[in-house]
Image (cartoon, rainbow, N blue to C red):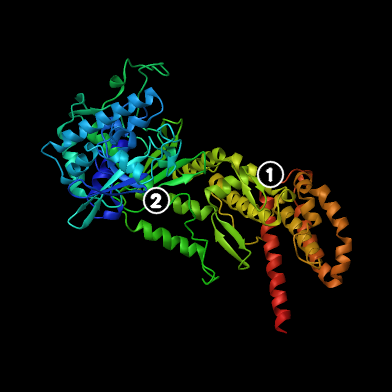
Amino acid sequence: MSWMKQLYLTYDEIAKRDDEDNVLTPLAHQYAKAQLEVLLQENGELVTINIVDKDAARTLIPVTEASSGRSSGVAPHALCDTLAYVVKDFSKHCKSEKDKNMADKKYEAYIQNLKKWCESDYSHIKVRAIYQYLTSGEMLSDLIKTDIIHLDDMGLYQDEKIAGQSYEKSLVRFKVIMHDLNSSLGDGIDMSLINSYIEFYQANQDGRRDICYFSGLEKVISDNHPKGVVPIAGNAKLVSANDSSGYTFRGRFRDAQQASALSYDASQKIHSALAWLVKNQGETIGTKDTRTFVCWNPQGKKTIPLFDDIYGIEEDEEECVDIDYGRKFRNTLKGYKDQFAEDENILVMGLEAATAGRLSITYYNEFSAREFWDRIEQWYDTCKWNYFDYKKKKNKERSPTFKQIAQCAFGTEKGSFIDVSDKVLKEQSQRLMRCMLEDGKIPLDIVNALVNRASTPTAYSYYNREYLLSTTCAVIKKYYFDKKGEKVSMKLDLNNTDRSYLFGRLLAIYDHAERITYDNLGERDTNAVRLQSAFVNHPMQTWLVLEEVMNPYYKKLGAKRSGYFKTMISEIVTMIQNGDVAELNKRLKETYLLGYYLQRAELYKKNDEKQEVEDNE
């Protein structure tokens, strides 16, 4: 089923809800940001004009097909519009003849449309009040009297702004006092007014009629589709064709009508549903160069966020530190899964503004509820590792987010964090999401990038290298499951004879044995850390160097403690030598990081247990 069909069904489903705080954009309406609010009496007399606070600027306004996607020319909205449209004689104080002529044309087109609505069978008392005030011609003087608009010595508009917008482009919304109750087109929604306009607009549509490619019925066709579906993408449109001049892309068709025909009501519902989904369930990747994803069910059932930390790792300080994150994840997932029947669908769509005016679909797929949840559960089960919480001094078992993997694999350390460009982040996040949802193998280039970076720890601060190491181990664990179906244990395997795993254990022992001799267990690098890059490429050769430089630290540890480490080293070396001798000095595989992490964790665990016993004696 196409994405348009699914969005159309979603609109009908959401429209059934009785939720005033979470309403769909009605037909022939869109949201805009208002800079001014005009308060009127029921008889059209002015009460006051106020500048709208930016936090309350979002306003639902009635529009026409032409005005909803306007970028230039004259295309008035139906009621709320900019000062150049709604103010009679706005041209009087414009600086250029061009601006004066355009302002006159805008007002004339606007007021004629408003008059038509007032005199129709679908008129509304508020519309009549607004029309009466605007035709009186008093608004311009009222704006000057209230010190909102300022004129220079020549009687022309000063180059000033109202709430960040020029005078000409400042949008006005209206509030009409009805029987001592305020009813607004801004902070309140009057359904009687909305329905009045919808009925008026549908009754007066005189556009081209044709067979709608979506519904298969003969209807009024929309040639100018809504913009601003993704607010962060501004004027970018998902459906558009404006190649009537310049011929940027002529393609196979003589005109846009040959390519497709989408009826007005279908276009409105599809775009409204998508805009609602983006606002309420959208996840945006990046800060400036962004990509937005929506994951939804056409029946309106809540789905899981794909890019957020669904483990809920950021716990309150008072929360128990012994929380089982695996159990918490399963319970979280179960809470979502239990809503769905197996035959229901879950849809995922990625959206990005390819240019300033074009919104592209970067990803779209439909999944049955069963496969969707099974694949998410499998991903989080096979791509998880222990992360050390430095505040609570405790390991947390969890899966890295897509953003975290992209940062560690392709980012650059900047101060205390690892940063990655928006372009790389959104592309890699989508690759990983696709890998998870479509049961694909984790990309090898990401695995290699992580392993190479984790093998050069001195390039990072102490906390970032630990963050990178845990992320790399989680991805290696996922890689081996995808490649061989192996489930890598997160506990030290003393019987593992893999050469790389064993060398990783050796590196961890040298690191720990040296580190515990320090007076301050801070962020000073050990020889094992400084030589790790060389150790990966020439393990046997570098091991001999490490063994030699450890002598002063063995003396500092004393015979008993140094003997403990030497015995462990001897046992591991024996296991290594039982393998192929010709392979001993070859570059290590990525599994060395698993052995390194797990052996080090085991040593720290035993050291903490020993310290606890000494403290209790």
Left or right side of 257 for 132: left
Residue furthest to the bottom: 617
Front tag of 2 and 1: 2
Which residue is under mark 2? 53
Circle 2 residues within 10 Å: few <14, some 14–19, many ≥20: few
The answer to whether marks 2 and 1 mark residues whose Cβ atoms lie closer than 8 Å is no
Residue furthest to the left: 121
Left or right side of 8 for 564: right
Whether residue 341 is visible, yes or no, is no
The amino acid sitting under disc 1 is Asn
Image quadrant of residue 398? bottom right
Query: Would you place residue 251 above or below residue 540 in this image?
Result: above
Q: CA distance from mark 2 to mark 1?
A: 51 Å
Q: Residue at x 33, y 30 (%)?
A: 92
Image position, residue 509 (x, y; %): 76, 61
Whether residue 363 is visible, yes or no, is yes
Image position, residue 499 (x, y; %): 72, 50
Which residue is under mark 1? 452
Q: Secondary structure at mark 2?
A: loop
- Quadrant placement of the N terminus: top left
Image quadrant of residue 102? top left
Left or right side of 575 for 121: left
Circle 1 residues within 10 Å: few <14, some 14–19, many ≥20: some
Foreground residue, 155 or 182?
A: 155
- Quadrant placement of the C terminus: bottom right
As drawn, the label of residue 430 is none
The amino acid sitting under disc 2 is Asp
Give the mark nearer the N terminus: 2 vs 1. 2
Q: Secondary structure at mark 1?
A: helix
Q: Residue at x 81, y 55 (%)?
A: 527
Foreground residue, 405 or 543?
A: 405
